[in-house]
Amino acid sequence: MRHNRQKASRKHLSFLHLNLNVTAPYTLLLDGPYLSEGVLNNVPILDRLVGTLGVRRSECRFLVLRSTVDELKSLPGEKFEPVLRFALDELEIVEDEGVEVEESAELSDVSEGRAGEAALTKLHTRWRAKATCRS
């Protein structure tokens, strides 16, 4: 199973490199629920991400937004204290002012997951067409 995930990740990275010119160092933005589930279930998040992507740790930057850190601080109880410590110690904190969201007609679909899938399907179709032409 792990081999299949790594193979799929390498294939996706290759696709993004060919079509969108995405190259190392990779910047990964981690959100609150992902951090919470990983830390509370004792999953080595950073090692798993690096292993799944099939790259070296030095080729990745792991970021978390300041608003996510503030949200973790505001959660009640001691349950999320390890998550907050992990975010402060292991991740690079990015201020929210540098993050810009463009307003578009597709933005409402992003929250439902339809716009991202449509864009990837379009790129994937174009990638398959290129691959067919090369063969």
Image: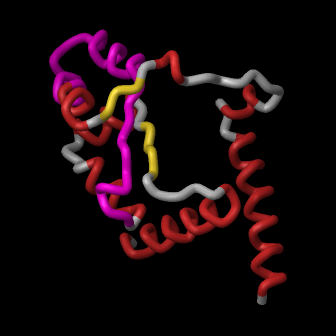
Judging depth in this view, the residue of 86 and 33 nearest the camera is: 86
- Where's the N terminus, which quadrant? bottom left
Q: Position of residue 108 (x, y in %)?
A: 74, 26
Q: Is 80 within the magenta?
A: yes
* Residue 122 left/right relative to 84: right
* Residue 62 left/right relative to 110: left
Instruction: Reply above or below: 7 against 9.
Output: below
Judging depth in this view, the residue of 81 and 88 nearest the camera is: 88
- Tell me the colour scheme of the image: secondary structure
Instruction: Reply above or below: 70 against 51.
Output: above
Residue occupying the point 18% across, 22% down = 81
Residue 65 image-quadrant placement:
top left
Residue occupying the point 42% across, 20% down = 95
Q: Position of residue 111 (x, y in %)?
A: 65, 30
Residue 59 image-quadrant placement:
bottom left
Q: Give, as a single range, the part of the protein colored magenta.
A: 55-84
Q: Is 135 within the magenta?
A: no
Residue occupying the point 23% across, 50% down = 44
- Where's the C terminus, which quadrant? bottom right
Q: Position of residue 96 (x, y in %)?
A: 48, 18
Instruction: Reply above or below: 124 against 87.
Output: below
Instruction: Reply above or below: 120 against 51.
Output: above
* Residue 131 left/right relative to 72: right
Residue occupying the point 37% across, 45% down = 61
Residue 6 image-quadrant placement:
bottom left
